[in-house]
């Protein structure tokens, strides 16, 4: 079984977690409403505060801010008065106290009002005047601004993580044909594996179409690739569907760009992804069911190949820990270029990865047990070493992939 983390998508040209922060800031700043709605000042304020906090504790001012950490901070700021710790905070930052969005007159109000005066339409005058009053007095607090910012950050993910088919060729060894179904779990939102399987002529399923709202996860039989997207997908939207007994029921719709109406409905509010450090056990949607399935799939796994995962998600680490301790002789392959940098590894890696590396060693030596592998290389080179070159891929047609229908992809 293979587990993909964010580092597995770097060779496709997708931004790292800190680069994604910069891309989202640029996206929001370029938006015509970014400054008007106060979102651009708000996100820069949050980043500045995080950097100031880190540098005060000896951190590097130029190290960047992890996008999920930033999003978690934005979400908490939008609901700070309801946090459990709120009664113990005597004063928040002055920057929050002075953060307001003043109301403004509606666009073209003067022209429309003058026209209404000329025509003598009393009803139109009343409506225009009422709209203007509402707009001017409609101030937004810092809480409301950060709530809007969180939604816009999720919405900008789709553009920041967009892919074309040619950029994912290096992942082809994942799909090396065998007698068994290929099983892949990923923490990434992008559609790299779906695009790759389509080009290789393989039939892939994520299982999302069979999810019925509970904690069970079913797979369609006879598929070549089972892809478990543990943190969701950029083309998923969680919706509520009325049932016969009157109680609403959660469903997940998957939309591709060929479904223009559906794709436009992929707004930030119900986008089917887990984003932010504090939402990894999101109760709504299929995420708990997929986490349970991840544990079940690990039970039948002899070797776990981990590519580009930083081991910072406690719920994923807990599942790996159970598998590693329960299996008589687990086999682990870690693929990540940071593993080649000894100084970086032992000073900055997560506590769980330190523990895992110790368990993979022969006693107190620096040698690893023969059943384990550490490959301090990028995803492409590491996967070729483990699986070979993979299947032959069809030539990339950018237009075809941009407009692919579900049956084609």
Image: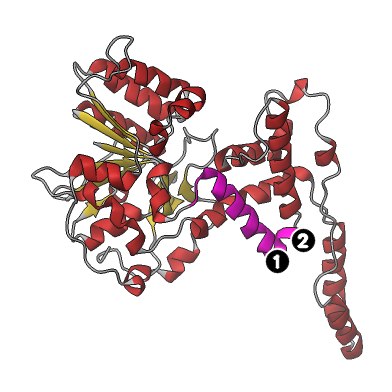
Front residue (pair 203, 113) = 203
Secondary element under disc 2, as helix, strand or loop, is helix
**Mark 1 lies on residue:** 32
Residue occupying the point 47% across, 26% down? 343
**Residue 211 visible from this viewpoint:** no
Q: Quadrant of residue 338?
A: top left
Are there few (<14), some (14-19), or many (20+) residues within 10 Å of tag 1?
A: few
Instruction: Residue lying at the far left in this picture: please name it.
Output: 179
Q: Please tell me whether residue 32 belongs to the stretch shown in magenta.
A: yes
Indicate which disc residue 36 carries: 2
Q: Position of residue 25 (x, y in %)?
A: 64, 53
Residue occupying the point 24% across, 62% down? 199
Secondary element under disc 1, as helix, strand or loop, is helix
Indicate which disc residue 387 carries: none
Q: Please give left or right for residue 392 compared with residue 212 in the image.
A: left
Which quadrant is home to the C terminus?
bottom left
Secondary structure, magenta segment, majority class: helix
* Residues at circles 2 and 1 in contact by the CB criterion of under 8 Å: yes
């Amino acid at each position: 079984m293979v587990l993909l983390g964010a580092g597995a998508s770097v060779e496709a040209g997708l931004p790292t977690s800190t680069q994604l922060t910069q891309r989202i800031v640029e996206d929001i700043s370029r938006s015509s409403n970014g400054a008007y709605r106060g979102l651009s000042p708000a996100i820069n304020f949050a980043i500045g505060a995080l950097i100031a906090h880190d540098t005060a504790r000896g951190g590097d001012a130029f190290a960047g801010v992890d996008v999920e950490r930033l999003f978690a901070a934005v979400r908490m700021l939008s609901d700070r008065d309801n946090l459990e710790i709120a009664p113990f905070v005597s004063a928040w930052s002055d920057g929050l106290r002075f953060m307001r969005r003043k109301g403004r007159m509606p666009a073209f109000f003067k022209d429309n009002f003058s026209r209404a005066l000329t025509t003598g339409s009393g009803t139109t005058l009343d409506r225009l005047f009422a709209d203007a009053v509402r707009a001017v007095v409609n101030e937004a607090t810092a809480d409301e601004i950060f709530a809007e910012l969180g939604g816009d950050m999720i919405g900008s993910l789709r553009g920041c993580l967009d892919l074309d088919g040619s950029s994912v060729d290096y992942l082809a060894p994942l799909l090396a044909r065998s007698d068994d179904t290929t099983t892949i779990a990923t923490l990434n939102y992008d559609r790299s594996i779906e695009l790759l399987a389509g080009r290789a002529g393989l039939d892939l399923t994520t299982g999302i179409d069979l999810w019925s709202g509970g904690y069970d996860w079913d797979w369609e039989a006879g598929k070549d690739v089972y892809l478990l997207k543990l943190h969701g997908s950029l083309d998923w939207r969680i919706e509520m569907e009325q049932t016969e007994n009157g109680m609403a029921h959660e469903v997940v719709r998957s939309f591709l760009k060929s479904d223009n109406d559906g794709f436009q409905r992929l707004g930030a509010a119900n986008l089917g992804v887990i984003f932010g450090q504090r939402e990894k056990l999101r109760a709504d949607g299929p995420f708990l069911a997929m986490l349970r399935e991840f544990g079940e799939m690990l039970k039948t796994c002899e070797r776990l190949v981990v590519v580009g995962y930083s081991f910072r998600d406690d719920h994923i680490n807990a599942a790996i820990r159970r598998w590693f301790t329960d299996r008589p002789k687990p086999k682990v392959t870690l693929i990540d270029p940071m593993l080649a940098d000894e100084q970086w590894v032992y000073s900055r890696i997560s506590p769980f990865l330190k523990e895992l590396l110790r368990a993979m060693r022969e006693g107190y030596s620096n040698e690893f047990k023969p059943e384990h592998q550490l490959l301090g290389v990028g995803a492409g080179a590491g996967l070729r070493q483990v699986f070979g070159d993979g299947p032959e891929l069809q030539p990339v047609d950018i237009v075809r992939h941009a407009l692919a229908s579900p049956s084609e992809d």
